[in-house]
Amino acid sequence: MSELPSAVVQNPACGVCGCETTFDDGYFVCEDCQLRFDQPNFGASFLDPTVQPCGARCDNAWHGDHKIQPGAGYDCGACKLPTGHTSILHWTGCLPRSIAS
């Protein structure tokens, strides 16, 4: 009878796009989002600190007022990922909010 294999430790996934990161020079790196995550708390920073944020506006049609449920909407911001990111996602940090009647 053979022994079962051990678990394989994997790099963490990017908090924006969900893709697996690579490990480089003490950081976990997402090339698509152009982010690096430090250890041990996984705080994110730009791979190139001289690059400005993308700034694209939220284009999620479901974030409009009353779209998901009556009396609710989202406060949407601009994309916080670095300009030039190749991820198809924009990270806008949208937060749910109640709409006064």
Image (cartoon, grey):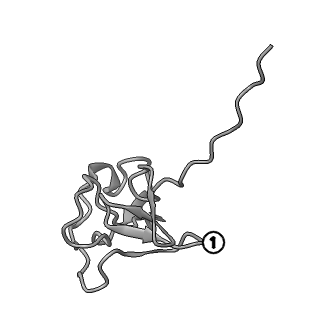
In percent of the image, x 47 and y 59: which residue is there?
Answer: 15
Q: Is residue 71 above or below residue 36?
A: above
Question: Which quarter of the figure is the C terminus placed in?
Answer: bottom left
Give the image quarter of residue 34: bottom left
| Left or right side of 24 for 80 | left
Q: Nearest the camera: 25 or 49?
A: 25
Q: Which residue is tagged 1?
A: 40
Image-based side of 68 in relation to 58, left or right:
right
Furthest residue to the front?
2
Residue 6 is situated, as x and y percent measured from the top left of the image, at: 71, 36
Q: Residue at x 45, y 67 (%)?
A: 100
Q: Which amino acid, by three-letter code, is at mark 1?
A: Pro
Give the x, y percent position of residue 73. 40, 59
On screen, residue 80 versus residue 44, left or right, reads left
Placement of 53 over or under 99, stated as above or below? below
x then y, percent, for residue 61:
26, 50
Q: Residue at x 74, y 25 (%)?
A: 4
| Number of marks in picture | 1
Extreme residue in the right direction? 1
